[in-house]
Amino acid sequence: MELPDRNTDYRDKSYWDERYSKEKAFDWFSDYEAFKHLLKDDIKTADNILILGCGNSLMSEQMYQDGFLDITNTDYSPVVIENMRNKCQHKYPGMSWEVMDILNMTYEPETFDVVLEKGTLDALMVHEKDPWNISEETEKAIENVLHQVRTVLKADGKFISVTFAQPHFRKPHYARKIFDWSVEQKHFGQNFHYYYYVMLKDSNLSVEDIRKENERTAKRLKNRTEEDRTIKYLEYEDNANFLNGIEL
């Protein structure tokens, strides 16, 4: 694996194109074997599955071997899509490989039963210094992706996100009423835990998730009010004596 000079390079398409021109395969966080027991509980073999930011991971090939035959793999790097298509199109005829940017998906509404990402959303946040307080730009980008995911999911479809982000960092992005889905979390791994989130479309958030969202909203509004508060000075006519207006 060719590591970038800076973490922010993970957001740079040219870095990925260059890397994929040399690298054959790599799986982020953990391989399919480590969490396939979770996927098999949430995905049916007949489901139409969209994978975001597939890269050169072996995950979709292994899923195909386990009977998940209707898989659309997407990535914004044309280099990796061409490589993976050439590698897999004859071995796995049910899979497709398409160049697609998660920030601008063009699929028709309600196309997929399942949308799956592993580490792709993490790559959008690598430049952030404080996971408790990410920038407005990144927050809007994440919200944009999640809105698009919800749009392309069929009724009662599932969005599955595999990440190293702990619930106190990631759930504030996922557990929001505007997405009209519920959020369930699990974890896997031995020495290091990875997190597995399932968002079920057209399902309600838990009472606890709603309470926490309301608290975050109230805190954000309070902070914004404090930032906008300005010191009000006494106003005088041009001919008024300013010094006389000061109470000593």
Image: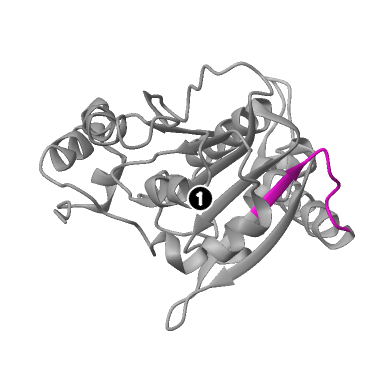
Q: Residue furthest right?
A: 207
Mark 1 lies on a secondary structure that is loop
- Magenta-colored stretch includes residue 182: no
Where residue 15 appears, x then y in whole percent? 19, 39
The residue positioned 46% from the left and 37% from the top of the image is 52
| Extreme residue toward the left, this view | 22
Q: Which quarter of the figure has residue 132?
A: bottom right
Please state which of residues 158 and 69 is positioned toward the viewer in this rendering: 69
| Left or right: 133 in relation to 152 | left
- Whether residue 172 appears in this view of the structure is yes
Residue at 12% over, 37% down: 21
User: For the residue marked with disc 1, what is the amino acid?
Assistant: Ile
The magenta span reads 198-206
**Above-or-below relation of 33 to 126:** below
Q: Is residue 62 shown left or right of residue 131?
A: left
Q: Categorize mark 1 by other alpha carbons within 10 Å: few (<14), some (14-19), many (20+).
A: some
29 to the left or right of 197: left
Q: Position of residue 245 (x, y in %)?
A: 75, 40
- At a point 56% along the width and 51% down the height, the residue shown is 161
So how many labels did they put on this image? 1
Q: Is 115 on the left-hand or right-hand side of 86?
A: right
Quadrant in the rendering for residue 124: top left
How is the rendered protein coloured? one colour
Quadrant (top left/top right/bottom left/bottom right) for the C terminus: bottom right
Q: Position of residue 166 (x, y in %)?
A: 56, 67
Residue 8 position, x and y percent, is 28, 47
Residue bearing mark 1: 134
Whether residue 226 is visible: no
Residue drawn at x 16%, y 43% as measured from the top left: 19
The answer to which of 227 and 248 lies nearer the viewer is 227
Quarter holding the N terminus? bottom left
Residue extending furthest bottom?
Answer: 191
